Amino acid sequence: ADDVAFALIRMASIGYEGEYTMDETFDRNMREAKANGVHTSPYIYLQTKTVEEARAAAAFAVEQARQYEITYPIAVDVESQYILELSVQELTDVVNAFCQVIAEAGYTPIIYSDYYKFTHEMDTSQFPYDIWLARYGGDHVYPGRTMWQATDKGTIDGIEGDVCLEYAF
């Protein structure tokens, strides 16, 4: 009722020290958003350091996602300090490997991070996938950007506290 068309909902944190940690509110958030007419899709906080780990994490995400009606891209959240110690090429390869498995499963992948990480930590020219750009207080222009996170201080009726506000193009 507050003009929300879609929600990307945290599914899990995957990969830190081999852990797969499901978000305890994921199922409820997916079901309730759909029940209220909101397009839904999961996002995965990725913390894998190798291509092989990234592929396994993506396969896990696909297995979980199959239980829901996914109507927006499945997002990979790339901002963990744990993986930002990788070289630009290593991180680019890890992200591409994750997204490739998502795409092969028939879903549309999208890569989330902030402007600095996209311009300094990864080579986005090697991504054949959409970009979900987090950039507060700046413009939303970036090659391949199809979503923009404009703020993390938004408000939505029915949700307590600050929320991130996203725009899809």
Image (spheres, rainbow, N blue to C red):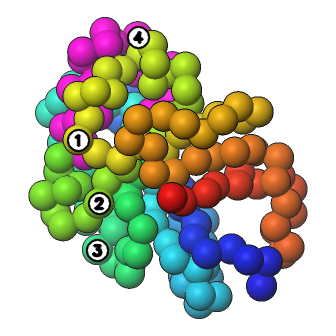
Q: What residue type is labelled 4?
A: Glu
Say whether disc 2 or disc 1 marks the residue closer to the N-terminus.
2
Q: Which of marks 2 and 4 is nearer the N terminus?
A: 4
Amino acid type, residue under disc 2 in the picture: Thr
Q: Which mark is residue 82?
A: none
169 sits left or right of 29 in the view:
left
Q: Find the magenta span and give its range.
A: 77-99
Q: Name the residue under label 2.
A: 108
Labelled pair 4, 3 in contact (Cβ < 8 Å): no
Q: Is mark 3 on a helix, strand or loop?
A: loop
Picture coordinates of residue 104, whole percent (x, y): 13, 58
How crowded pointer 3 is (Cα within 10 Å; few <14, some 14-19, many 20+) is rated as: few
Badge number at residue 66: 3
Front position among marks 3 and 1: 1
**Residue 128, labelled with which disc?**
1
* Distance CA(mark 3)–CA(mark 1): 23 Å
Q: Is residue 115 above or below residue 65?
A: above
Q: Residue 121, position in %: x, y?
A: 42, 16
| Callouts 2 and 1 close, C-beta under 8 Å | no
**Of marks 4 and 3, which one's residue comes earlier in the chain?**
3
**Observer able to see residue 82:** no
Question: In the image, what residue type sits under mark 1?
Answer: Pro
- Name the front one of labels 2 and 1: 1
| Disc marking residue 85 | 4
Q: How far apart are marks 3 and 2 (CA)?
A: 13 Å
Q: Which residue is drawn at 17% across and 51% down?
A: 101
